[in-house]
Image: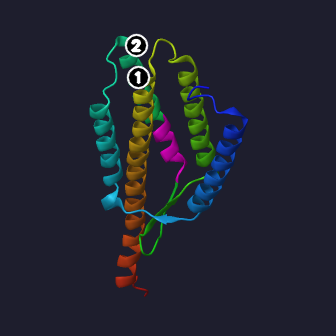
Amino acid sequence: MGPGSYGHGGVSGIVVTLVVVIAVVMLRNSRPRRLRLEAMWIRPLIFLVLIAVSAFAAPPPLTPVSLAAMALALAVGAALGWQRGRFMRIEVHPETHDITSRASPIGMLFILAVVAARMGLRGMAYESRGVAGLTTAAIASALILLVGAMMIAQSIEMWLRARKLLAEAQAAKTPLASRAANPPIVS
């Protein structure tokens, strides 16, 4: 048996583990979490560093096919991340202007589909020692780029939307405050 063949016991163990992880993640993400605009640059930076370290530690093969696959992975990852970011619920408290976010059920299903597709591609790569002329190293690099681009694009989309919602909440509160300070004169 190769690295991609798990056998019956291995598959059931993976399924049980995935079910537990999914349940924990869904419970954790169903509650609103504080979103700090001033710190949202940290997550994309961490992913950029991880991608760079990964590329330097194990450089991918630089063939035209692998470069095309990695470019495609970047584009698909960015598109998926942007969409996943749009699925996140972002709310601004009207009085305190605290920003919270939480994953939507559709967003959770979306990420599960991406993870399942990634696992399927990974299994195909191990079984056939590559897919469509790509080595497993090229596929691994493309998957790292896909996940990194997805997380970076999600963070950027959420930051842009949260900033806009905060500006709208602050603008809506300002006229109310000025009206309270200067009540209308009734004659």
Neighbour tally class for label 1: few under 14, some 14-19, many 20 plus, Cα within 10 Å: many
Kind of element beneath mark 2: helix
Give, as a three-letter code, the residue at label 1.
Ala
Q: Amino acid at mark 2?
A: Val
> In the image, which disc is placed on residue 101?
none
Q: Is residue 104 left or right of residue 48?
A: right
The picture quadrant where one finds residue 63 is top left
Which image quarter holds the N terminus?
A: top right
Quarter holding the C terminus?
bottom left
Q: Which x, y percent locates residue 103?
A: 56, 54
Residue 124 or 102: which is nearer the viewer?
124
- Identify the image quadrant of residue 95: bottom left
Circle 1 is placed at which residue position?
138
Furthest residue in direction front, as rendered: 1
In the image, what residue occupies the spot 39% across and 85% down?
A: 185
Tag 1 and tag 2, C-beta contact below 8 Å: yes
Residue at the (66%, 39%) spot, across then down: 10
Relative to 134, 58 lies left or right: left
Residue under circle 2? 65
Q: Position of residue 116 (x, y in %)?
A: 61, 36
User: Residue at point 31% right, 17% down?
Assistant: 62
Q: Is residue 75 visible?
A: no
Q: Residue at x 51, y 13 (%)?
A: 132
The boundaries of the magenta stretch are: 80-88
Vertical side of 129 occupied by 186: above or below = below
Q: Who comes first in sequence, dot 1 or dot 2?
A: 2
**13 vs 24: above or below:** above
**Is residue 33 among what the camera can see?**
yes
**Residue 72 locus on image (x, y percent):** 43, 23
Q: Nearer the viewer, residue 164 or 100?
A: 100
Looking at the image, is mark 1 or mark 2 nearer the viewer?
A: 1
Q: Secondary structure at mark 1?
A: helix
